[in-house]
């Protein structure tokens, strides 16, 4: 890590595009991007955020399951100098509103028709924080006052990449990259503030210890809203050159179908994940042959 050419996540995104130029970075439905293509999409999201008025240090929240738009949005926030605030997908409207208010989030990326959940509707049941200026719908129908993700990305056309690069160049390893809130089991959720350099060091070590390698294909069932999905998932793949294969919700049949379909080699998780698979009556050992 001492010889790594980066101490920030934006620098990591650029470096991954150079080191792993021919490797698939993201596989989700019709999306199949190499690392350079992922970098370009992330930079486009960063420019769209700048066009939306997001300044360095501003908070942007994400409330959605594991989909490619989540990863692009979150990385775009960090490349634009903003701070990612993930929201637990199990939160109700009141709980999400609390996180939005406490973090002072200016924008929210969310979904309305994914996994039978409409987060905009849930939020409307609570008092929307005054700091929230835009709700951007990554997937699903568009309630009044929301912005489709495609229209949001189109805002990037008003900001050139030189301006984006100039903003990115101001980011240091000591700047905040994310605020992760606790679940609030024994009280109100608390926000843990994390900086770029510490996250880069910690998860470079984690990915090395678990043996993640360039060319691995990583089925990310660990939720993006959790450090396990965001840091040990998205960022670990950038660190080591593994392919991100987001999986929206864990269930054994869909996971067993996806492993051979995408030649998945890495599937991290708590012991309960593996035990559930081993205990499933339809477990097919041949379906998991690609797992390392």
Image: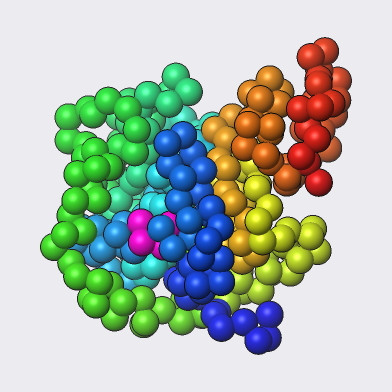
- Between residue 214 and residue 166, name the one nearer to us: 214
Indicate the position of residue 78 as horizontal and vertical percent values. 42, 65
Q: Is residue 107 left or right of residue 91?
A: left
- From this viewpoint, which residue is outermost toward the left? 158
Q: Is residue 14 left or right of residue 134?
A: right
Residue 119 vs 226, above or below: the answer is above
The answer to whether any part of residue 283 appears in the image is: yes
- Between residue 14 and residue 138, name the one nearer to us: 14
- Between residue 88 and residue 245, name the one nearer to us: 245
Indicate the position of residue 255 as horizontal and vertical percent values. 67, 28
Q: For residue 40, what is the image quadrant?
A: bottom left
Rendering colour mode: rainbow
Report the number of numbered marks. 0
The answer to whether any part of residue 186 appears in the image is: no
Q: Which residues are magenta?
A: 38-42
- From this viewpoint, which residue is outermost toward the bottom? 3
Identity of the residue drawn at 81% across and 27% down: 286
Q: For residue 249, what is the image quadrant?
A: top right
Identity of the residue drawn at 55% across and 46% down: 224
Q: Quadrant of the N terminus?
A: bottom right
User: Is 266 within the magenta?
Assistant: no
Indicate the position of residue 282 as horizontal and vertical percent values. 79, 14
- From this viewpoint, which residue is outermost toward the top? 281
Magenta span: predominant SS is: helix
Identity of the residue drawn at 66% across and 61% down: 214
Indicate the position of residue 99 as horizontal and vertical percent values. 44, 47
Q: For residue 111, what is the image quadrant?
A: top left
Residue 278 vs 264, above or below: the answer is above
Identity of the residue drawn at 43% across and 57% down: 38
């Amino acid at each position: 890590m001492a010889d790594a050419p980066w101490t920030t996540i934006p620098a990591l995104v650029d470096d991954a595009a150079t080191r792993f130029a021919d490797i698939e970075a993201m596989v989700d439905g019709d999306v199949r991007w190499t690392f350079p293509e992922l970098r370009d999409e992330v930079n486009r999201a960063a420019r769209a955020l700048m066009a939306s008025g997001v300044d360095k240090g501003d908070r942007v929240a994400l409330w959605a399951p594991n989909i490619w738009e989540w990863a692009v949005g979150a990385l775009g926030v960090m490349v634009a100098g903003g701070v990612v605030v993930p929201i637990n997908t199990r939160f109700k409207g009141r709980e999400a509103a609390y996180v939005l208010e406490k973090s002072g989030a200016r924008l929210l990326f969310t979904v309305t028709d994914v996994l039978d959940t409409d987060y905009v509707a849930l939020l409307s049941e609570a008092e929307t924080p005054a700091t929230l200026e835009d709700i951007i719908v990554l997937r699903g129908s568009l309630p009044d006052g929301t912005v489709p993700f495609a229209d949001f990305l189109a805002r990037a056309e008003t900001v050139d990449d030189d301006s984006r690069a100039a903003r990115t160049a101001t980011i240091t390893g000591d700047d905040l990259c994310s605020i992760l809130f606790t679940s609030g089991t024994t009280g109100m959720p608390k926000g843990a503030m994390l900086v770029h350099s510490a996250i880069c060091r910690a998860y470079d070590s984690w990915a090395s210890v678990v043996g993640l390698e360039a060319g691995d294909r990583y089925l990310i069932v660990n939720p993006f809203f959790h450090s396990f999905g965001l840091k040990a998932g998205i960022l670990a793949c950038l660190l080591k050159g593994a392919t991100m294969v987001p999986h929206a919700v864990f269930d054994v049949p869909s996971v067993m179908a996806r492993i051979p379909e995408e030649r998945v080699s890495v599937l991290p998780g708590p012991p309960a994940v593996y035990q559930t698979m081993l205990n499933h009556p339809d477990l097919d050992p041949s379906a998991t042959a690609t797992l390392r």
